Amino acid sequence: MATTTLHPAAATTYRSSLYEWLTTTDHKKIGILYIVNSLLFFFVGGILALVVRAELAAPGLQFLTDESIYNQAFTMHASVMLFLFVIPILAGFGNYAVPLMIGAPDMAFPRINAMSFWMLPLAGIILMSGFVLGGAAAAGWTSYPPLTEDRVLGSTGPGQDLWITGVILIGTSSILGAINFLVTIFKMRAPGMTLFRMPIMAWTVLVTSVLVLMATPVITSALIMLFIDRNLGGHFFDPSTGGNAVLYQNVFWFYSHPAVYVMVLPAMGIISEVLPVFSRKPLFGYKAFVFATAGIGALGFSVWAHHMFTTGAVFLPFFSLMTFLIAVPTGVKMFNWIFTLVRGQLTFSTPLLFALGFLSMFLIGGINGAFSASVPVDYAIHDTYWVVAHLHYVLFGGSAFGVFAGLYYWFPKMTGRMLDETLGKIQFVLMFIGFNLTFFPMHALGLQGMPRRIADYASGAGWNDLNMAATIGGFIIGISMLPFLWNVLVSLRSGAVAGDDPWEGNTLEWATTSPPPPYNFDRLPDIRSERPVFDQRHGHGAGGHK
Amino acid sequence: MSSSPRKRSASDVILIAILVISMAALVVGALANGFWDVMFPPEAVTRQGREIRSLYDIVFWIAVVIFVVVEGLIVYSVIRYWRKPGQDELPVQTHGHNLLEIVWTVVPTLIVGYLFVISFQTLTSIDAVAKSPDIHIRAVAQQFRWTYDYLAEDGVTVLFTEEVATADLGGGMHVPVGANVQLQLTSPDVIHAFYVPKFLFKRDVVPGITNVFDFTIDPVEAGQTFGGQCAELCGTGHRVMLLDVVAMTPDDYEAWKAAKIEQANATPPPKPSDGPVSATLELTAKDIKYDVKSLEVVADQPFAIHFTNADPASVPHDVDLRTGDGTVVSDEATIDGGTDTTYTFAGLAAGTYTYICSVHPFPDMTGTLTVK
């Protein structure tokens, strides 16, 4: 029986818990800090989304009389949701779960781990400070030059420079985190934990880290060039002085398309843990799933220009073919998840509901994405609300549902207490209905010709009803967060005590206490498969193999 | 150790019922309200657009079949494999199935391969650019308006320029039906996109690059006007960058074009005499905003506005006068940033007028002129 005997020396001086949280290098506490910080920004980004939806509810400029405020609202909504919610909260789950899952006492570099976290609130404050320093970034989260080159033309104030600074800082945090994950996964697995016995969550974090490491420096260089153009008289992207506007788009999307997989692969990892546990079956096709994950990572680097089909400056057939092809490994995953359910024994706890929400909504996000792979169809739908629908089915229907599956799944491990199931189900139902009411009509809006990023539209355009539906749905999503917040507050104080393993889990985090002690394990079970805790409970090979 | 729900409890049944009923209600309600129709693009009005529409229909139906099969599989599994009361034995621990993995790798590959091939065929057809098209037009997109240079057969010489982008103001890009129109797209400032929903088509207007595409409007569409707008975020006035394409019979088009050429070659009418003015008002534009939002003059007295454009050189502005219903009273020439000029106006009848920048016709560059 493998054991870990790492115990910290008992603290000799008393330290307040605030001091403890501010100075911790424990991966679990840092993971929780990531998650809490990301949720705070999720609510900020959500409020910005409601500002956008409220303005678009009906034709006419209702309460944002200054259009530049509208542009700031959608720009910051996207920037906050992508850079300060989705990416970091998934990194937070990785931080919390991966060392536990591979039987490690901590991340490989605990202090660097703390530093990568603390860069995030700082970057968030820098990003948001534009609102009080003369206007936040307002050129879209893509920040295309030459619009971002000239302050007057873009109506971008200091917010654009603050945005560049904040995003570079977040990128640096991601790079440090990726190195930390890679070293942890390659060097700190417990005895018996071979790569092909790692939980899928650890695999997705591994592939994600490779993507981050290869892609993030590229966007950093793009943003530095943009900063030089704006402030130091550079001409990288300004055609009027010999620069190339499309160059920025190539470099930007070379990061930002792989970044989509950074934003969704760990969520796939979460539901790949949740589905087997609540089906009482192993993940169907473990190795195929690993290869599909690696395949998505590799193909993800050859599809960036599908965001640029209408520029007239892209070799269309190559990027069209690769974009179609990336649907194949994604489809492999989808079928493996579904066949994990088949012949299982499903228990409809809240984590499973959110995981099923992920499956059914991400399916739509995959299918409506294939429309854009077809270049002629993309000519019709590019930069319309169709694309807004697509990206939200991937990032909200996919990633955010995955995030909530993870929150409900690991909350008992993190706090020792269960979240309330009834409130969880109320949240799920509201979120699921609100989500579809918001984003499904956007397909139709896009097909009927409504472009993205407009503050207003003519009342005769025929878009009124669909926009009103989307706005109502948006506010239902907003309301669905109330039972969640209430649930967390109440459960932290008086939730049912979770015990070590409330879900009958498969992976090593369920073999220690809830919450786990510093350095995680007093002793580890034998690791003979990707489900060591299942093996311990039922015996290796229990339940009949097939 | 808390017990997680293990049985098919009443609340689970209610939950699933709520979900199924609400989703069914959404679907039925949507279908009953003609929602099905809006899942398709509008009927295309160009040859190229019709080809895109045919392709869309194929992609759409394949998507519907895949959606129904896979979503159906999810819903079926959820309903069928519910853990029943008393089910304490583990289910069979299936770890995978190689043949299935191969099937669901190969079949999707074939489907996307087929989609790629038909997409590529359509692309080749709609992206074809004629060597000698019937009509050459150059659309110039700038913050925040479109202008159209009508070019001679060489595709370079400008015959005349249509300054007004939309039909409601008497402008729009006029083209004959049935003709192969070649549109060149240029921008002097930032990236815009030429987008007409009924063409099912858009193309970016990138500074430093001249994008070119061809379109042919179907003959049955003569007399129709097709609205469009900029589809690439270009600043605070992005949403006002509207445009119209006016389809004409070839005869009407020739008459319109002849009149335009004649108008362009005529000497401009002399300005009303610059007599003594009763007052000279000051107005400055900076950051694409007028500094003064309301002005006042005496009725029936000539007056002048000394206008300073304090924006960068690349940002032109002007000061036009319009009545409340939008009728243009006075159409003045634009000046570049960093310059100033004095516009003189004849006396106006008492009332309320709007002064507006024709380049940036949105609230920041609009003011009220009170005449009494």
Image (cartoon, coloured by chain):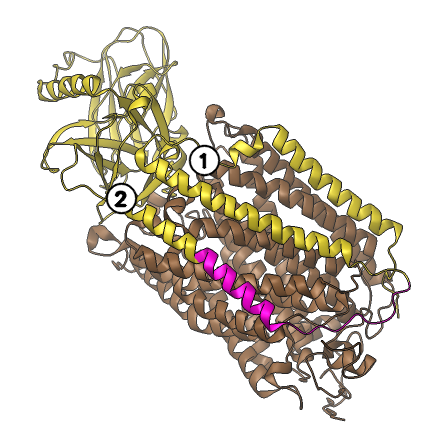
**Residue A544 x %, y %:** 78, 77
Give me the residue at 75% from left, 40% from top. B21
What's the amino acid at mark 2?
Asp
Q: What residue sits right under mark 2 in the picture?
A: B189
User: Subunit of mark 1?
Assistant: B
Which stretch appears magenta?
B86-112
Magenta-span inclusion, residue B178? no
In this rendered view, identify the residue nearer to me: B16 or B281.
B16
Q: Distance from label 1 to label 2 (Cα)?
A: 31 Å
Give me the residue at 63% from left, 43% from top. A436
**Residue B117 x %, y %:** 37, 54
Q: Secondary structure at mark 1?
A: loop
Q: Quadrant of residue A187?
A: bottom right
Which color was chain A given?
brown
Image quadrant holding the N terminus of chain A, namely bottom right
Q: Nearer the viewer, mark 1 or mark 2?
A: 1
Mark carried by residue B11: none
In this rendered view, identify the residue nearer to me: A351 or A240.
A351
Which color was chain B given?
yellow
Q: Quadrant of residue B194?
A: top left
- Earlier in the chain: of badge 1 and badge 2, it is 1
In the rendered structure, the answer to whether residue B36 lies left or right of residue B11 reads: left
Please count the marks in the image.
2
Q: What residue sits right under mark 1 in the picture?
A: B41
Q: Give the answer, above or below, for where B110 lies relative to A32.
A: above
